[in-house]
Amino acid sequence: MRPFLLFAACCILLTFVAPARPLDRVEAVAVTSPAGGVRLNGVLRLPSGSGPFPAAVLLPERGADARGPRSADSELLNGLADYLVRQGVAVLRLQERGQGGSGGSATTTTLAERAADAIAALNFLRTRPQVDVTRLGLIGHGEGGNVALLAGAQPLAPTFVVAVAAAGLPARELLATQPVMYGKVLGNDTTDLARQHQYERAMRAAEQEAAKLRAHGSNAAQVQTYLDQQRLRQKAAMRRDEESLVKHQRAMLEIVRQTPDNSQAQAILSNMLRQRYPGIAAADVQATVQTLTTPAYRSFLAFDPQPTLPAVQCPVLLLQGEADQEVNPALNLAALKKGLRANANVAELRYPNLTHALQFASDSPAEAAAAAFNPDTPADIYKWIVSRK
């Protein structure tokens, strides 16, 4: 991926907005990105006082703005922004292309264009007297973390990068091994839910059978042996289903990669989805295959973070929840550290039982949607930022 030479001046428009609360000042801003001349709307939050303040640009997971302010992705960054501003860090958040009045289209935006947008945001902050340009960085979540690392390898790079749940593996491998790579389009498909419910019913039946064994005189060792056998059987079945899903998703991604004609690719993908999910709604099929063949998705599918990571020389903080099912923590952190091995200023934080959005993990979908965010993460990020000299 060729670096953008982003020395061209950015067009900057400012409109003052009354402070939302006494602790910080809020400005609506617009920055013009050199990648296509696209205007991006955003909000700059300045702590009280004259500064200069450390500053960060927040880069969301792709699609976070479209999912709304109550999505886990948005709430993660919103909560982080609140904390940082209270601690004296200026925060800039630009709306993604095609959202919130920003120009361009989310379906055509490439990773390289997102990196250019991030550099444009940094250039804007460099013009502000309230900002300490020696502590001016990028904080990205998910794909936003990879955007931050890409920008860190460009001219006019940030002075620090915080990458939360970023990918270290090639995107085609990352996507293939996600629980459902197109889940953000389909939601929880009834076929996969039925399999999960089947496992749960089987284990409840095993517990009931174990109670009968106890009632009929079986000793504790015999009952435990029976339960262990049932659990092993269920784990083997679940493993086979997971392997089948990964195989199916790899095959779909290969169709996208090898079939540049969208109409042809969509026809094949539609047939593959209907075969695996016989009850899938036609509208869900159409939405899914259209997403998988957008320029943005094709761009990410071709992405490999490794070639650009050696060029990232600024300090980097890698954060990962160990219960992340979208970005395997062990594999991706190892790959990121391998790519950054020439950088002597790489730190790592891993959080037990936290998900992709750094929420506490839960087995219940309803509880997971309302799960609390880890309160330690914002403080950890802040301490690391202010320790940069």
Image (cartoon, rainbow, N blue to C red):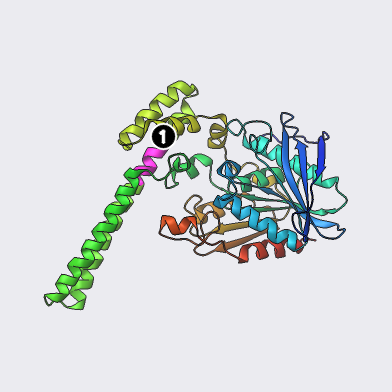
Q: Residue 141: percent from the left, percent from the top?
A: 61, 50
Other residues around mark 1 within 10 Å, as few (<14) / some (14–19) / many (≥20): some
Q: Is residue 166 above or below residue 373?
A: above
Number of numbered markers: 1
Name the quadrant of the C terminus. Answer: bottom right
Q: Is residue 241 visible?
A: yes
The quadrant of the image that shows the N terminus is top right
Residue highlighted by disc 1:
284
Q: Secondary structure at mark 1?
A: helix
The residue sitting at 38% across, 29% down in the picture is 270
Residue 230 sits in quarter: bottom left
Image vertical order of residue 341 relative to residue 299, above or below = below
Q: Position of residue 92 (x, y in %)?
A: 74, 49
- The answer to which of 76 and 317 lies nearer the viewer is 76
Rendered image quadrant of residue 317: bottom right
| Magenta segment includes 205 | no
Front residue of 251/40: it is 40
**Where's residue 324, x and y in %?**
50, 55
* Residue under the image location 34 percent in, 44 percent down: 190
